[in-house]
Image: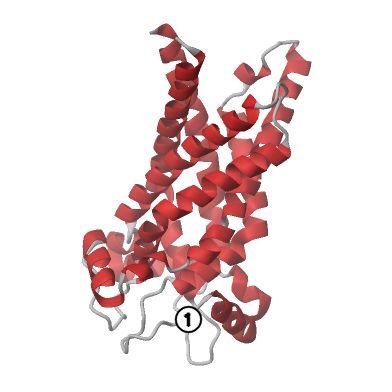
């Protein structure tokens, strides 16, 4: 097979592996995503009262008052968005890396991985912001809300466009683009730790291709470590985006006018702590999620490549 076609085939296999990884992650850990979103938009104003004391209490309360449906609110857009996001992300990421690699005869360094991940993240953000906005709104619906609830993904999409216009679908785009740094940090840390792990395997076993010696436990540790680093550095952007994407109050006025309004109000009423609301449930969801994602991705990619080489 010509080199160009071979390279293109691997990019599509990256996309397939990424999509399957994203689906697996959401299906396993969605209730924690619901809890995180609800914590993120709860504020410290004197007029507000916290519905949940902690992550465990939140899961118990949602299950008791809303049932399984509450714990899986926004599941369809979460699955749809995550599958598309990871598929596109790995596709754009592998294309960007290949482009940089074409100009170098040596291994790519951290700056190339950072640039590739940032490029992929920005492109994915443009495609998927409307999906995440709908997901956030569905997750925030509770029996206590006075607004007419959305019946599902398509109803939410239709109602938002009708009542608020197309531009609303891109609310939170600013912090969303800033969150590109999250993926960039995560993938850069992952790639550098992966190279280190391969080197260690080669040194210990005298094997020339340490990449083949990496197993699911290695990918679990690599995925969790890279995700931890990314969360610690970028979590406030997630809080800002979630608050911007809330449904307007019953009088039609948005809760926050823009990102700077969110920052000012959060700092005023909650201090630094407000920018890290929901981080516990975020860790509980995303650390294992990252591990699942990379374990599935690497193993599916390996399987596809073995199958491809045999055909």
Q: Is residue 199 left or right of residue 55?
A: right
Looking at this view, name the residue that lies furthest to the front.
Answer: 103
Q: Secondary structure at mark 1?
A: loop
The residue depicted at 61 percent of the width and 82 percent of the height is 264
What x and y, as percent, mark residue 301?
48, 25
Q: Is residue 100 above or below residue 269?
A: above
Q: Quarter-wise, where is residue 193 in the image? A: top right
Q: Position of residue 34 (x, y in %)?
A: 41, 62
| x and y percentages locating residue 232 in the rendered image | 66, 57
| Extreme residue in the bottom direction | 47
Kindly identify which residue carries mark 1: 256
Indicate left or right for 71 with 180 as reference.
left
Which quadrant, please, contains the C terminus?
top left
Q: Determine the residue positioned at 47% across, 11% down.
A: 2
Identify whether 98 is placed above or below 26: above
Q: Is residue 130 left or right of residue 148?
A: right
* Mark 1 neighbour class, 10 Å CA radius: few under 14, some 14 to 19, many 20 or more: some
Q: Is residue 31 visible?
A: yes
């Amino acid at each position: 097979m010509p080199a160009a076609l071979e390279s293109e085939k691997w990019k599509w296999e990256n996309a397939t592996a990424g999509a399957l990884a994203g689906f697996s992650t959401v299906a396993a850990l969605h209730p924690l995503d619901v809890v995180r979103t609800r914590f993120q938009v709860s504020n410290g104003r004197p007029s507000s009262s916290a519905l949940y004391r902690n992550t465990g209490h939140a899961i118990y309360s949602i299950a008791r008052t809303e049932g399984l449906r509450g714990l899986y609110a926004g599941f369809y857009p979460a699955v749809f968005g995550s599958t598309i996001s990871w598929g596109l992300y790995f596709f754009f990421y592998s294309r960007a890396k290949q482009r940089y690699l074409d100009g170098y005869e040596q291994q790519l360094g951290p700056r190339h991985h950072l640039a590739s991940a940032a490029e992929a993240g920005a492109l994915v953000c443009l495609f998927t912001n409307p999906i995440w906005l709908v997901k956030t709104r569905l997750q925030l619906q509770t029996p206590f809300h006075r607004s007419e609830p959305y019946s599902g993904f398509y109803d939410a999409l239709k109602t938002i466009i009708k009542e608020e216009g197309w531009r609303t679908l891109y609310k939170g785009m600013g912090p969303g683009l800033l969150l590109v740094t999250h993926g960039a940090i995560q993938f850069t840390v992952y790639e550098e730790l992966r190279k280190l792990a391969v080197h260690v395997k080669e040194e210990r076993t005298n094997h020339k291709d340490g990449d083949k010696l990496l197993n699911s436990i290695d990918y679990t540790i690599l995925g969790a470590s890279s995700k931890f680093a990314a969360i610690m550095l970028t979590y406030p952007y997630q809080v800002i985006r979630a608050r911007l994407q809330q449904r307007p109050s019953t009088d039609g006025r948005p809760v926050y006018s823009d990102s700077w309004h969110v920052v000012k109000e959060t700092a005023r009423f909650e201090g630094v702590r407000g920018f890290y609301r929901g981080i516990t449930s975020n860790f509980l969801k995303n650390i294992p999620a990252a591990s699942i994602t990379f374990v599935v991705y690497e193993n599916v990619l390996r399987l596809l490549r073995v199958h491809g080489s045999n055909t």
